[in-house]
Amino acid sequence: MARKLNLRIWRGNSVDGGLQNITVDANEGEVVLDVIHRVQAEQMNDLAVRWNCKAGKCGSCSMEINGKPRLACMTQVASFEEDETITLTPLRAFPVIKDLVTDVSFNYKKAMEIPAYEAPANLKPGEARMQQVDVERSQEFRKCIECFLCQDTCHVIRDHEENKKSFAGPRFFIRIAELDMHPLDTLRNRKQKAQEEHGLGMCNITKCCTEVCPEHIRITDNAIIPMKERVVDVKYDPARWLGSKIRKRDGIL
Amino acid sequence: MATGVFSSGRAKISERTLRTDRWWLQPAFTVLVLFSFIVYATFRAFENAHYFVEPLISPFYSPCLSTGCVTGSSLLGQPLGVYHIFGMMISPSLFILIFPLGFRLTCYYYRKAYYRSFWFSPPACAVAEPHSKYTGETRAPLIMQNAHRWFFYAGCVFNVILTVDAILAFRNEHNQWGHMSVGTLVLLANATFLWLYSASCHTCRHTIGGRLRNFSAHPIRYKLWTYVSILNHKHQNFAWVSLFGVALADLYVRQVSAGSITNLYFF
């Protein structure tokens, strides 16, 4: 059954802009992205919105819906009250390009700063083997669709533009954790780099990244906190440091 | 200069948040509960009375290490003397509370709770914080959060002591074994909640097996890690339950010791 939906859509560019009210039809079973497309087709032909798969797997339609970072394609219209006005804005942690589209290139720059996997020198391509239990651990992190909702909600950069230089953000902490937990990765200073170059110490565990993740990756519990504990092993725990020097335990530090 | 969500180049929106839900409810509740606990714990730590009645001892005063402790309350002896500040005797509780307090202060869950609720950093997800600068846990004093594992180790020692206290509560007021009272259940529940809180701790998870790169090479530690991970999912719940448990156990012992209520014996 169709219903009338009241929307407030942010329209503008990096210089100026504002919220515009609009009423649009919405059909049963539709998601917010469907409604945006109807607005585009019928009332605002030049409305800019980034989208692709409409299945919650490409991470393109990230925006803020009633102030919460969400995927427009995974937000059911039926989840809102009949008389509720739905506010749609671009991600507020990144520069806006036009309307609901933001410039997320910050994330690609940060991705390039993470050192890649380094295979053991004695293994040729195709020879690497891993046990299932070791694969499973990092498999959770591989679910990331790079929607950057976690980056958007992280107050370290959302509320402090100046921190963007020194803080990689939760999306890249799971990348670092995935590599640091990889049994075959031979790069041994990821923990130090995470703390000193990627700003792991700036995270104060507020778990907002976990709350907004559409893939339900337990970013804080399974990646950030384990990485913080690993950093403590090498930087703030003299007993662990001494033990590693005496016993030369490879595979731990 | 405008920063954060008001930075140049970002969408021009004057509101600090556009959230329409009651995002303030959780931080408000956290402040209410934690502040109430802090007030009660401070009062009890300084009260220096009504913390022991055979065979029960308050978790706020165990182990009681000062020569000023009530007779019979010192499980580990009395290596510390009686000290005064401004003419007031320092409560024996103050010698030991730093350890459980430090454990909770540096706990990853409580960090989330008080950073959000007390420091508004941020008050809730996607709600702009009021601070103009932010350095996180990279410098003093917050870099001390990295000492969590040391407080975890100390917390485990306290858990052992409080478990012994609960076992000692299987006696009657004449120190005869084979009895059980409501106080026994209270101390047992308190010790159980504290063990669950410690066992579900992120540092425990890391120590048990989280620090390994290669689970397949350490099957026993991997198995233990999976068990701790299950508990770790509920760490927040255990943090709250154990906090209430400590306060209620102390309150019970206080009321029995003060004679307000009678410690009912089952047998």
Image (cartoon, coloured by chain):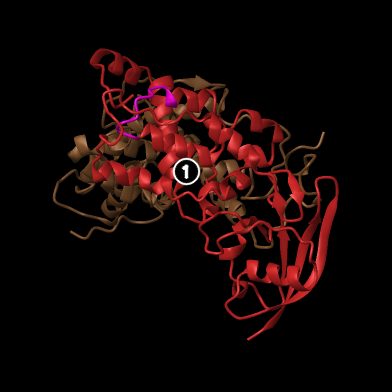
Chain colours: A red, B brown
B188 magenta-colored: no
Image quadrant in which the N terminus of chain A is located: bottom right
The quarter of the displayed image where residue B83 is located: top left
Most foreground residue, B167 or A132: A132
Q: Position of residue B166 (x, y in %)?
A: 25, 45
Q: Is residue A159 above or below residue A70?
A: above
Q: Is residue A73 above or below residue B89?
A: below
Kindly identify which chain the residue marked by label 1 belongs to. A
Q: Residue at x 38, y 52 (%)?
A: B234
Q: Position of residue A35 (x, y in %)?
A: 68, 71
Magenta span: helix, strand or loop, mainly? loop
Amino acid type of the residue tagged 1 in the rendering: Thr
Q: Where are the magenta residues, as a range?
A: A182-190
The residue that disc 1 covers is A220
Q: Position of residue B174 (x, y in %)?
A: 20, 45
**Lateral position of residue B96 relative to residue B178, left or right:** right
User: How many callouts does the rendering have?
Assistant: 1
Q: Is residue B46 above or below residue A189?
A: below
Q: Residues within 10 Å of mark 1 (few under 14, many from 20)?
A: many
A183 magenta-colored: yes
Q: Is residue B47 visible?
A: no
Image quadrant in which the C terminus of chain A is located: top left
Q: Is residue B187 above or below residue A82?
A: above
